[in-house]
Amino acid sequence: MSRSSSGAVAGLTAAAIAVVGFLAYQASANVPDNLGKAPAASSGPGPTGSAKPSAKPRPDALPEESGSGTRVVYALGKDRVWLVDAKDKVERTYKVSPSTVDPEPGTYAVTSRSGSITGSDGVPIEHVVRFATRDGVVIGFSAAVNGAMPELDPAQRTGGVRETREDGKAMWVFATVGTKVVVLP
């Protein structure tokens, strides 16, 4: 080869290396962040074309819109109560028998408590924790001393949200005067 042809080959080689280098730089600058990582789980159709079943929320799971901090959460539609500590950990949850007069959804505080009295339905009750009034009816949680859960008589206007005796005792220990009560629809 002549000196001029070997110089041309060297020039072409240098130019080719520069182009390859430039293209490599462009390619690396446009690499997606997740390249080389395991694909994220998808709720869309899988390889067979069928959708993966989504995890159903547990019926006793604390509702997200229940606030924060120490509180009693009462979900009217679920007839369920949660006792939640300051770190938003559920200490206890249980079903209740609703009163005939429901409190309006909102945030309340425990206003008073009674160890044992006779309920507005004439039944001896214990561990009464009151937190609201609606249309002249005082509303609170309580347990019947005989352990019975009442059958609602819509003609009777009562505010007693009945718990089992065991749940009533837990409420009594947890919900002192001033404790927040969040009522959800």
Image (spheres, rainbow, N blue to C red):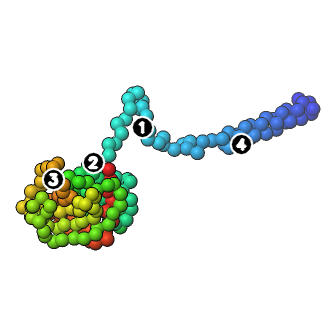
Disc 3 versus disc 4: distance between alpha carbons? Answer: 80 Å
Which mark lies nearer to you, 3 or 2? 3
Give x and y (percent) for residue 24.
70, 40
- Decide: few, some or many residues near mark 3? Use Cα within 10 Å; few <14, some 14-19, many ≥20: few
Which mark lies nearer to you, 2 or 4? 2
Disc 1 versus disc 2: distance between alpha carbons? Answer: 29 Å
Q: Nearer the viewer, residue 118 or 38?
A: 118
Circle 4: residue type: Tyr
Q: Nearer the viewer, residue 134 or 147?
A: 134
Circle 2: residue type: Gly
Q: Is residue 111 above or below residue 46?
A: below
Residue under the image location 83 percent in, 33 percent down: 12
* Residue under label 4: 25
Circle 3: residue type: Gln
Give x and y (percent) for residue 65.
38, 54
| 2 or 4: tag closer to the N-terminus | 4
Circle 1: residue type: Ser
Q: Residue 62, can we see it?
A: no
Instruction: Name the mark on residue 56.
Output: none
